[in-house]
Image (cartoon, rainbow, N blue to C red):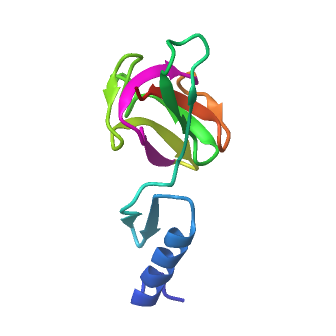
């Protein structure tokens, strides 16, 4: 039995990655590691609303976790957080990472504004749909 990856194997890995919620997968074969990465990030949920006790007319978008996993505010131990309360963000600004089965999935702000609230503690487990951040969008 051969352990070499065939073009058909690679096509099947890419098909499975495309059909999954993951953005990256690594395959090891014959001492070689091949990394496959999705070009587009996971879909995320953004819900506009009003912040209780905020000035009239102030609205926000909620950045929600697209999947269950571990929430990280920085790219690695000892690294500065991607954002803090008060940080300005654009829709494509990375605000955190959700780790799922050792795969790191960057999560973007999805809205332009200012980080109003960080709703999760670094390293905490999160569930799908859980609010991670509130972005003031006034």
Q: Can you see residue 2? A: yes
Q: Position of residue 76 (x, y in %)?
A: 39, 32
> Which is more toward the observer, 24 or 64?
64
Q: Position of residue 71 (x, y in %)?
A: 54, 33
- Which residue does the image show at 56% across and 71% down from the upper left? 19
Q: What secondary structure characterizes most of the magenta part?
A: strand
Is 29 included in the stretch rendered in magenta?
A: no
In the rendered view, tell whether residue 102 sits above or below residue 32: above
What residue is shown at x 45% (from left), y 28% (from top)? 73
Q: Is residue 105 magenta?
A: yes
Is 83 situated left or right of 60 in this image? Answer: left
Quarter location, residue 53: top right
Q: Is residue 96 left or right of residue 92?
A: right
Give the quarter of the image for residue 38: bottom left
Q: Which residues are magenta?
A: 103-120
Residue at 53 percent of width and 13 percent of height: 54
| Side of 77 where 98 appears, left or right | right
Expressed as whole percent of the image width and height from the top left, the position of residue 66 reads 58, 48
128 with respect to 123 (left or right): right
Q: Observer-nearest residue: 37 or 87? A: 87
Q: Quadrant of residue 41?
A: bottom left
């Amino acid at each position: 039995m051969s352990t070499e990856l065939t073009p058909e194997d690679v096509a099947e890995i890419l098909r499975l990655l495309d059909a999954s919620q993951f953005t990256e997968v690594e395959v090891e074969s014959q001492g070689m590691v091949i990394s496959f990465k999705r070009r587009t990030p996971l879909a995320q949920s953004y819900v506009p609303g009003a912040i209780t006790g905020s000035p009239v007319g102030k609205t926000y978008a909620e950045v929600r976790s697209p999947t269950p996993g571990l929430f990280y505010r920085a790219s690695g131990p000892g690294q500065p957080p991607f954002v803090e309360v008060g940080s300005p963000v654009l829709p494509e600004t990375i605000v955190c990472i959700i780790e799922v089965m050792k795969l790191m999935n960057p999560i973007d702000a999805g809205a332009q504004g200012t980080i109003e609230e960080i709703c999760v503690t670094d390293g905490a487990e999160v569930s799908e749909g859980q609010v991670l951040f509130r972005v003031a969008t006034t």
